[in-house]
């Protein structure tokens, strides 16, 4: 049985618990790198989100860091799923029209992480981000 989420509404099912005909959701997970056997459904599923963009010197290293975290999870017999989010560099866009996208990108990043984590009922997620003025990692 997957770990219990105290925030889950009473009676709501995890995608790993869907009965009968609706059981196609867990079957879809076999097409991922995480699920290989039925026993894997008993493992925690952890999301590794990162703001990653080659054109942003603050974040270009985060894809690799996320891959290291995922490899560590796999080594610990935990299923890790990595996904990316958008990001706008304050430093690059400062003083340009692009700056009008910087602040709103922060809400968009939060929405993307919440959507992926909630929609796939991840047990935990790591969010890797780096801002030119202050590092940010959320769990």
Image: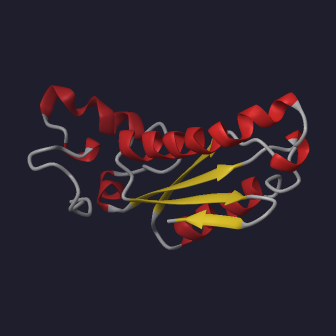
Q: Is residue 78 left or right of residue 97?
A: left
Q: Quick check: can you spot residue 127?
A: yes
Q: Quadrant of residue 94?
A: top right
Q: Nearest the camera: 28 or 119?
A: 119
* Vertical side of 22 occupied by 17: above or below: below
Q: Is residue 90 left or right of residue 14?
A: right
Q: Quadrant of residue 4?
A: bottom left
Q: Quadrant of residue 19?
A: top left
Q: Nearest the camera: 136 or 59?
A: 136
Q: Is residue 43 left or right of residue 73?
A: left
Q: Nearest the camera: 2 or 75?
A: 2
Q: Quick check: can you spot residue 85?
A: no
* Vertical side of 14 occupied by 138: above or below: below
Residue 72 x/y as whole percent? 60, 70
Q: Residue at x 48, y 51 (%)?
A: 34
Q: Residue at x 85, y 28 (%)?
A: 97
Residue 6 x/y as whole percent? 20, 62
Q: Quadrant of the N terminus?
A: bottom left
Residue 26 x/y as whole percent? 31, 39
Q: Residue at x 43, y 49 (%)?
A: 35
* Vertical side of 108 occupied by 127: above or below: below
Residue found farthest to the top: 21
């Amino acid at each position: 049985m997957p770990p219990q989420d105290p925030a889950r509404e009473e009676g709501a099912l995890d995608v790993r618990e869907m009965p009968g005909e609706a059981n196609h959701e867990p079957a879809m997970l076999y097409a991922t790198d995480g699920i290989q056997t039925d026993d894997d459904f008993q493992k925690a599923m952890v999301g590794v989100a990162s703001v990653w963009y080659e054109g942003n010197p603050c974040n270009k290293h985060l894809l690799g860091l996320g891959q290291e975290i995922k490899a560590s999870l796999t080594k610990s017999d935990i299923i890790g799923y990595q996904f990316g989010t958008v990001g706008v560099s304050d430093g690059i866009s400062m003083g340009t029209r692009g700056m009008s996208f910087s602040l709103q990108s922060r809400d968009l990043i939060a929405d993307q992480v919440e959507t992926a984590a909630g929609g796939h009922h991840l047990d935990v997620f790591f969010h890797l981000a780096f801002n030119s003025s202050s590092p940010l990692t959320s769990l």
